Image (cartoon, grey):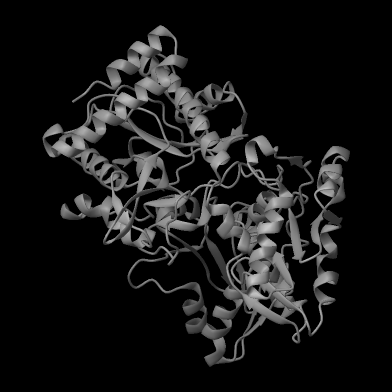
Amino acid sequence: MNTKDRILELRKKMAEMGIDAYIVPSSDPHMSEYTASHWHGRQWLSGFTGSAGTLVVMQKTAGLWTDGRYYLQAEEQLAGSDIDLFRAGMEGVPSFTKYLADNLEIGSRIGIDGRLFSVSQVREMEKAFAGKNITIDLDHDLLVGIWNDRPPLPAEPVFIHDIVYAGKTATEKIGEVREKMAEKNIDYHLISGLDDIAWLFNIRGNDVEYNPVAISYALISDKEARLFIDSTKISEDAGQALTEAGIILEDYESIGSHLSGLGADDTVLLDPYRVNSLLHGLIGDDVKKLEDVNITTTLKAVKNRIEIENLRQAHIRDGVAMVKFLYWLDKNVGKTHITEITAADKLEEFRSKQENYMGLSFPTIAGFKDHGAIVHYLATEESAYELDAEGMILIDSGCQYLDGTTDITRTVVLGPVSQQQAIDYTLVLKGNINLAKARFLKGSTGANLDILARMYLWEEGIDYKHGTGHGVGYLLNVHEGPQGISMASSKVKLEDGMIVTNEPGAYREGQYGIRIENELLVREDIKTEFGEFLRFEVLTWCPIDLDAVVVDLLGDDEREWLNSYHQKVYAKLSPFLDRYESQWLKEKTMAI
């Protein structure tokens, strides 16, 4: 079936069940950003492959809402589907809840699969629809019977993340969680986020591509720590390690009976943004519920001493792979057949040869020329450009290592660029440098710092429609909260030991895209009579292409920072390169 046929079949089922609108999000029962293919219903129905988006289907209309990272991609992929694109966040574009409230009649019924919507999302919808007496039915997976070749739930094996990498045992981490629970007078802590569970129990899996997690739930009390997971994923060695840590293994589906068994004297802590609405409904109304960010989310965000040292080494190895790739690209572009896809494959090949390699942390974005303006572009055999010695290619990539997760973007000059390209490139670089060298008061949030990366672009009337930075996991999700750097960042304060990315950009539709990204580690800096101050330590080591830099636009302090950074890049990476690569790197890191 094509997209139109799939939507038609869905509408037939909606009519049979008396449902006026059906909403399909991008999530799974654990509110994951990236999901197993079993949960790619929105993608299957609409043809839009971006990681973020919500599909709304009514009997006569259908719409897809997505954010600024995916406007261009969604426009291309929805063409001819009869699904309208709603550019979320743009002026005058209603939210999907506002759209439904405006277009549905009084007393209409909306169907959703409640496993795919968080408690907070359902509450927001109920609030938006209350004025028209619109009801939300939570128990509808209407793809059953339509999506006949739907992939099964994954059952990949779990492995233990060794203490030499994790830095703390699962027992120690569970103890820290219990200390926080005691402070809050909590009897039980329900944890649904897959990354939180993986971190807490020092387990890793392969249930979600690029994210080394295992589909599971956790329920922690002052005496018991229960892991709800498909038993076929647990090897004898992993099971023994978990049991020795005092962790009780339960069947994945039995989480419901445990929650429904909680009593009126119990208090349970849960994150309403990460627990799905159907699961929440199994907890009795008489049970006291405390809603807050998972304790594990906050603990996980601050890397321990061993994790930090491991990360430093992982980033050096990742930088070596990047330089080997950039050297290869420089020597071969315009001489041999290279496409966006084969370039990405070659980069993966260099990474795969590095110690502790575990796979990519997300699909490599390799956007040549105007494809670089599509923020989360993913090349296909049909769309992939062949590279030649002109313009720029934007390469956003990352890797999973046993000792860390990496995320780096470089915009590489392959040949002559226009004056405007060079100016835009330099403005992006200035923003990256400005944020990297910041000193900021302890207690600052990412929202306080975001302007440092945008200010030079704003002065020229340029902006980018994505955040400046996000948290990064540790052999976990490449996007990790709660910290981040954006105008819309939460009130989470940046703390010593947190990691954020620094990735300003500039995108001109139909022409080119530019982004420069390094990972930053938050560090304690100085203490004065005015307070305590923090700074950033750069973790990413890879040359920043100087061929598009308009040197006259850089201040003395910016040139000093860039020259110092490049001096460190050469010192850290050259010992692991052959003499040709080392000489090339020396030339690429010359002072300007």
Residue in the image at 74% along x and 76% along y:
16
122 on left or right of 320: right
State the residue lying farthest toward the front: 529
Residue in the image at 71% along x and 56% along y:
174
78 on left or right of 170: left
Q: Quadrant of residue 209?
A: top right
State the residue lying farthest toward the left: 552
Count up the numbered dots. 0
Counting from the top left corner in percent of width and height, residue 17 is at 74, 78
Q: Is residue 293 above or below residue 435?
A: below
Counting from the top left corner in percent of width and height, residue 589 is at 29, 22
Q: Is residue 157 above or below residue 199?
A: above
Q: Is residue 368 above or below residue 275?
A: above
Instruction: Tell me if residue 420 can be seen.
Output: yes
Q: Quadrant of residue 283?
A: bottom right
194 on left or right of 467: right
Q: Quadrant of residue 546?
A: top left
Instruction: Tell me if residue 275 can be seen.
Output: no
Counting from the top left corner in percent of width and height, residue 45 is at 62, 58
Residue in the image at 76% along x and 50% along y:
149
283 on left or right of 47: right
Task: Depth check: give the residue in front, 330 or 468.
Answer: 468
Residue in the image at 72% along x and 73% along y:
278
Counting from the top left corner in percent of width and height, residue 410 is at 37, 34
